[in-house]
Image: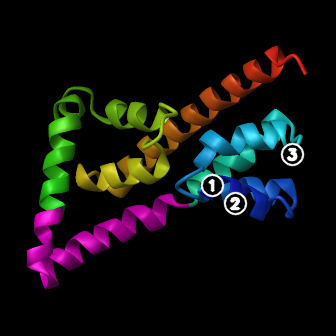
Amino acid sequence: MIVETMIAWVSAMPPWIATVILSALPFTESRLTIPVAVTVWNMTPISAYLFAMLGNALPFFPVYFGFRFAKRFAETYAPWSVVWFDRALHRVQRKIGNTYERFGLLAVIAFIAVPLPGTGVWSGSLLAVLLELSWKRAMLAVMIGMLLMGGIVLVLTLAGVAVDPS
């Protein structure tokens, strides 16, 4: 329901703007935007990919630096809330920590590149903060993962369009 409302809201805009906006949102990102741009708004696959990647890249800095600021603020001014950050960090380290220690940035790239719910630029940026990556390493991992994810979604979209009988 929310996603359909968002698509209806941006459909009145030019397709390239709608693609950038939808790709920047956490619920849609490129996983939804590329198929909609190609099949509904009739954008060329390359245009859909490029505008979706532009929009998908936009949230990295606000999410990464915003979450880092919130974490530091909580540690300084609300030490009782650090319990939440510690729990989240412990959970992330338990799930991906060994994988990250073994594979490094490839683990973060793979996490973002898999086009499943709960993965993508937003959650990858949060993961980078929780793993305490520098912003340069985080940006590198997030952008590579994002480009791979966009490519996977584009290929799957084109394969679905090619076999669609209508």
Element class at badge 3: loop
Give the main secondary structure, helix, strand or loop, of the magenta stretch.
Answer: helix
Amino acid residing under circle 1:
Met
Quick check: marks 2 and 3 in contact, CB under 8 Å?
A: no
Element class at badge 1: loop
Residue 83 forms part of the magenta stretch: yes
Image check: 56 left or right of 125? right
Image check: 152 left or right of 74? right
Q: Nearer the viewer, residue 21 or 46?
A: 21
Residue 159 falls in which quadrant of the image?
A: top right
Q: CA distance from mark 1 to mark 3?
A: 20 Å
Give the numbered dot on residue 5: 2
At 72% across and 27% down in the image, what residue appears?
Answer: 157
Residue position for label 1: 1
Quick check: marks 1 and 2 in contact, CB under 8 Å?
A: yes
Amino acid residing under circle 2:
Thr
The N terminus is located in which quarter?
bottom right
x and y percentages locating residue 106 in the rendered image: 36, 30
x and y percentages locating residue 78 in the rendered image: 14, 81
Residue position for label 3: 41
The C terminus is located in which quarter?
top right
Q: Nearer the viewer, mark 2 or mark 3?
A: 2
Amino acid residing under circle 3:
Trp
Region rendered in magenta: 59-84
Considering only order in the chain, which callout, 3 or 2, is on the residue closer to the N terminus? 2
Give the numbered dot on residue 162: none
Image check: 164 left or right of 50? right
